[in-house]
Image (tube, rainbow, N blue to C red):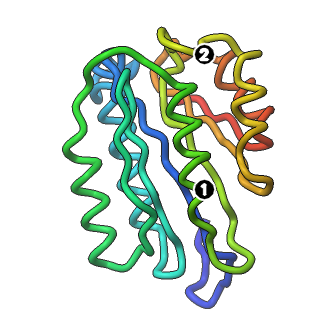
Amino acid sequence: PDVTKEAKRNPLCICAVIDRSGSMRESGGSTAGSKMEYVKRSMYKLIDHMTDADSLSLVFFDDRIETTEFRMMTSANKEVMKQAVAKVDPRGNTDIGSAVVTAGRLFAQYEGGAGSIERIMLLTDGEANIGADQPEQFGSIIADIRKGVTVSSFGYGARFNEALMTSVAKQGKGNKIGR
């Protein structure tokens, strides 16, 4: 919806947890591209809508994890984050649990501004094949994340693991969206 420029909202403090495993190379369910391309487009849109008062960190995962520190979303930092996302290529296996643990650790080290909305956004097809791979295994992982940080899950592909993604979102008091 149209939002007036004068509209105020609380600052966002988001850690995007991005699946770069081999399964993200597969078609997203249409001729428009791979699941990874859908994730990248989602991230570009998110970054474009962030303001200078918002902050963003990235966790890229497969069977290895790489992170970026939280950055305030100035124009320059938006470009840095977009470039980091653009470089991501699918590879390896899928360790969602370790990636969510890493996001929780980033929040343990960083606190957004007063009144900020703190959220982990998991962007994946949910096809975990290393570590936690069952919905019930995520309860203790999410319980260890600092109070006030919610976890939302975004499922990509025609056959994303809906049971896992729904469980993560419910346990993380967030939202589940399938694409």
x, y percentage for residue 71?
A: 42, 69
Q: CA distance from mark 2 to mark 1?
A: 21 Å
Residue 55 badge: none
Q: Residue at 68% across / 72% down in the picture?
A: 116
x, y percentage for residue 119?
A: 64, 53
Q: Quadrant of residue 144?
A: top right
- Viewer-side residue, 126 vs 103: 103
Question: In this figure, what is the number of numbered marks?
Answer: 2
* Quadrant occupied by the N terminus: bottom right
Above or below 79: residue 107: above
Q: Which class describes the residues within 10 Å of circle 1: few (<14), some (14-19), or many (20+)?
A: many
Q: Secondary structure at mark 1?
A: helix
The residue tagged 2 is 132
Q: Do labels 2 and 1 touch, CB within 8 Å?
A: no
The residue tagged 1 is 107
Q: Amino acid at mark 2?
A: Ala
Q: Amino acid at mark 1?
A: Phe
Above or below 32: residue 67: below
Q: Which class describes the residues within 10 Å of circle 2: few (<14), some (14-19), or many (20+)?
A: some
Q: Is residue 162 left or right of residue 29?
A: right
Q: Residue at 33% across / 68% down in the picture?
A: 78
Q: Secondary structure at mark 2?
A: loop
